[in-house]
Image (spheres, rainbow, N blue to C red):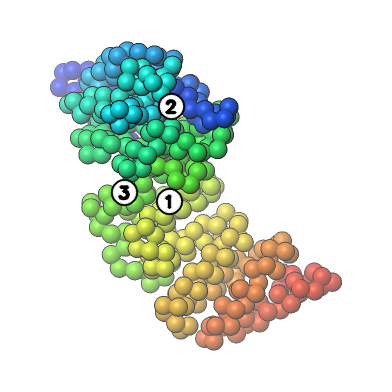
Amino acid sequence: MGFGGVGVADGVERRGHVLLLAGDAAVRRGGVLVAPGVNVAALAMVPAGVLLGCGVPADMVCLEGVRDPNTVLTRLRVAVGASGPLFVYVSGRLTADRRGRQLHVALAGTTAGSVRYTSLPWEWLVGELRSRSTGAATVVVDLVADRAAWPLVGEYGTLPGLAGLPGVEAFGVVRGPATPAGDGVAGGVSNYTRQWIDQLGRAPVRPSNVELHVLAAGSAGLAPGTLVVPSARELEMRSGAATGHLHQDPAPAPSPPPAPGTGSVVVGDPRARLHALAVDGRHGEADALARVWEQGVVERWGRISVEAVQCVEIRADLARMAGDFVSAARLWMGAGRARLEWQGADAAEVRDAAAGALYCWTQVRDRAEALEAGPELVALLRALPLLDPDHLRLAELRLEALRTPDRSRSLHP
């Protein structure tokens, strides 16, 4: 993601800044929920220019084991004062001042009784960012809220103060205190942070911050109830404010995604990016991105909406491209049943979905999986009298062969 010119602007050298803050670790019953020092060490291996998304000269400062919040504040003010782009990463335990009910980032040595004196008030971070007058800023957080902070997180429904700050993009996750130890953590590095690092390392062109966030959140295996900022719904609403709804008019049928580079990325309609990822063989990323997009569409339009079914059909085609014919067949069957209910048996979209399901089902090589999905497919085909009768006969013959072990050579008619 570019931030404008590089190097010198208006006669003044633009210099970026990366600040990586490791707060206190979050531990539950002896198990580590987040190891902020490990996260920061891993992120520090990424060049500052890659984190910033541009080529300006930049400084990187890593803070770990700090006990004095004023030390953090001083470093934060230096970072915010940078003339170029700013990247701030915060990982650790989110806690609360029980007297004032204010959120804090716990630092090394912070206890329940010393929050007001040994932790970084969340408002300090927000206030410094609010005072920034030049350059774009990106804030990424990977936090676990303790039992004092989690109710406040639930009340806010987001991380307070970050939304709407001019020039500031904020992304991240906050997991709750009941998260099982080790959940969302791979090799000591939190999965969300790991996904940011992996995406930055493998992409030939740096993805946008929004895209990095969506892919990271979608691939991190986050525990239910995790706060994701911004959520898929917030991203979709943000896109809608700028470009209108995801679909002004329902498309008549699922069509191949446009060629790479011909659409917006993630926000709005990400089919171009999905197609590019699938063609590049990055099927897991394509599936994660499609799931997050579908989640936003479902939250806005409902699971049985035309828009949501179109997302299912796109996921079905992605599964086919990935060679996951079982998932592809089931997704096509689900789309066909939904469209059959709305549009009737004579609709072209219903026939297309049924034909897609049949093709993918015939490619399933595992006998047990094909046998499990077969009856549902046959039932769908029988509900479509206008479909080519050969399709139904093919499905019935294959299902009969699957049910007869000594006819295993007939599994793939």
Residue that lies at the very extreme toward the bottom in this rendered image:
385
Residue located 48% across and 24% down the image: 25
Reading the image, the residue beneath label 2 is: 92
Reading the image, the residue beneath label 1 is: 292
Residue located 45% across and 49% down the image: 289
Q: Are marks 3 and 2 in contact (CB under 8 Å)?
A: no
As displayed, is residue 187 above or below residue 163?
Answer: above
Q: Determine whether, in the image, residue 165 is placed left or right of residue 324.
A: left
Q: Amino acid at mark 1?
A: Val
Residue that lies at the very extreme toward the right in this rendered image:
406
Q: CA distance from mark 2 to mark 1?
A: 25 Å
Q: Secondary structure at mark 2?
A: strand
From the top left corner, tell me how far across and down residue 66 is, in percent: 40, 14
Nearer to me, 224 or 12: 224
**Number of residues whose C-alpha sits closer than 10 Å to that of mark 2, classed few (under 14), some (14–19) or many (20 or more):** many
**Number of residues whose C-alpha sits closer than 10 Å to that of mark 3, classed few (under 14), some (14–19) or many (20 or more):** few
Q: Amino acid at mark 2?
A: Gly
Quadrant of residue 115 within the rendered picture: top left
Q: How many marks?
A: 3
From the top left corner, tell me how far across and down residue 116 is, in percent: 32, 20
Q: Secondary structure at mark 1?
A: helix
Q: Check residue 315 in the rendering and tell me which mark sits there, or answer none.
A: none
Nearer to me, 186 or 11: 186
Q: Are marks 1 and 3 in contact (CB under 8 Å)?
A: no
From the top left corner, tell me how far across and down residue 112 is, in percent: 41, 23
Q: Determine whether, in the image, residue 164 is placed left or right of residue 56.
A: left
Whether residue 56 is visible to the viewer of this picture, yes or no, is no
